[in-house]
Image: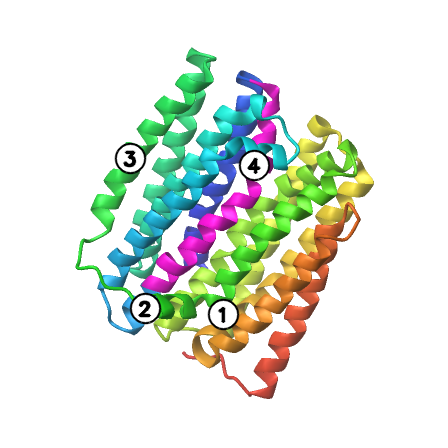
Amino acid sequence: MNRLLRTGFDTLLTSVTPIAIWFLLGILVDKNLINIFTLIYPIQFIISSIKSIFGVGANISAIRDRTKENVFSGFLCGAILGLIILGCIIINIDKYINFMNMESGIYRTFAIYAVAQMFLQLLLNLSLCKLYYENKHKLANKCSLTFNLINFCSLIIMSLITKNQIQITSISFVITLIFVLVIVLRTIEKTKFKINIIKCIRYDSAFLFAEISMFIIYLFGFKNSFDFGEKYILAISFATLITDTQWDISDTIKTVAQIDITKKEFSYSEHLKNSKKLVLGLIVSSIAMGIVLYPIYKVDIKTTLIVAGIELISMYIYPIYLTKLTYIQLEHSALKATIHKQISNIIRIMCSFILSPFCTSIGLVASVIYQLVVTDIIVRKNKINMEMK
């Protein structure tokens, strides 16, 4: 439970900081900047996909296959790929903003900053991943806390000094970049370049393709939902705001399970018990956030309850099938885990094109039911024992 909380703390900081930043920048600089959170939301799944291969996969391979070079090589490949993809988005930022039905003139400068900051977040995540697999969770916490404090303080302080958006973003980015480079140089040990990308993909393939699918789901799902008008835009954005951090933190369930399974120290019953405690706390925090922020946003209560309710019920069920899927991925059949996870993602993608403001919620329900049933069938049919202790 302690490691779940420590790993979740890093995710909490990474998730909450942008929300606080855009909220305050909307007050200090331009009220429209609060919408940056929704604008760049799908892009987070791009950096998660890169981390899946070159962070998680590379570190698991380094332990299981005794290929120490994978960690440095994975970091280098992940950094280069991230630079190329996010760089292309920055170059075409106006097209991206217009695609999301927003005005490029209003959001351009801070959208560029947000995407560039995601690249720095990717570098940090790849470094933190190495620390997790070395059981250096306290050091990872310190690095994550410092990064987010620097990011937050530099932006807010500069916003109090000047309203020039280019000056605010440029100075904040340079300060954060210097810190990230220091962490990378201290964390990632330079070795010769050698990496088995196929193995890196295989160790986290189910979740890699899930991240890619989530990018498609939210890119087109949000675009579809937002066509139904401002009432739904605000309600869906509000529901996302009060549950997104919790969903991010819940992914630590997978992270800790992967580490324990890789090191042959896993106990399904113990892990599930701790995971449920974590999720219940996250659900309570979502409800509390909704109550506190409702008077500010004054969203349509019926629409919000439908979207947020589906999110929270799904979150409660999440650790049950996620833990099983993680074990199946690493100890039984990576192919089965990947195929069934991708089927659930395809279901969600198809639902994203349903002509309804609740298309992404419908997709979530269908996906959760499918994964809950299928993972249970695989475990029962193959009589898989998930107790290593």
As displayed, is residue 253 above or below residue 388? above
Q: Amino acid at mark 2?
A: Ser
Q: Amino acid at mark 4?
A: Tyr
Mark 1, residues whose alpha carbon is within 10 Å: few (<14), some, or many (≥20)?
A: many
Give SS at disc 1: helix
N-terminal label among 1 and 4: 4
Left or right: where 19 falls relative to 301: left
Instruction: Tell me residue 384's x, y (percent).
Output: 52, 84
- Can residue 281 be seen? no
Give SS at disc 3: helix
Q: Are marks 4 and 3 in contact (CB under 8 Å)?
A: no
Mark 4–mark 2 distance (CA, rounded to whole Å): 36 Å
Residue at the image point whose x is 56% and y is 34% from the top: 95
Mark 2, residues whose alpha carbon is within 10 Å: few (<14), some, or many (≥20)?
A: many
N-terminal label among 1 and 2: 2
Left or right: where 4 falls relative to 322: left
Numbered mark located on residue 295 in the image:
none
Residue that carries the numbered disc 1 in the rendered image: 326
In the rendered image, residue 92 lying in the magenta stretch gets the answer no
Residue that carries the numbered disc 4 in the rendered image: 96
N-terminal label among 4 and 3: 4
Residue at the image point whose x is 72% and y is 34% from the top: 234
Q: Are marks 1 and 4 in contact (CB under 8 Å)?
A: no
Task: Classify residue 54 by image quadrant.
Answer: bottom left
Residue that carries the numbered disc 2 in the rendered image: 61
State the predominant SS element of the stretch in magenta: helix
Mark 4–mark 3 distance (CA, rounded to whole Å): 29 Å
Mark 2–mark 3 distance (CA, rounded to whole Å): 28 Å
Left or right: where 299 falls relative to 45: right
Numbered mark located on residue 179 in the image:
3
As displayed, is residue 332 above or below residue 205? below
Give SS at disc 2: helix
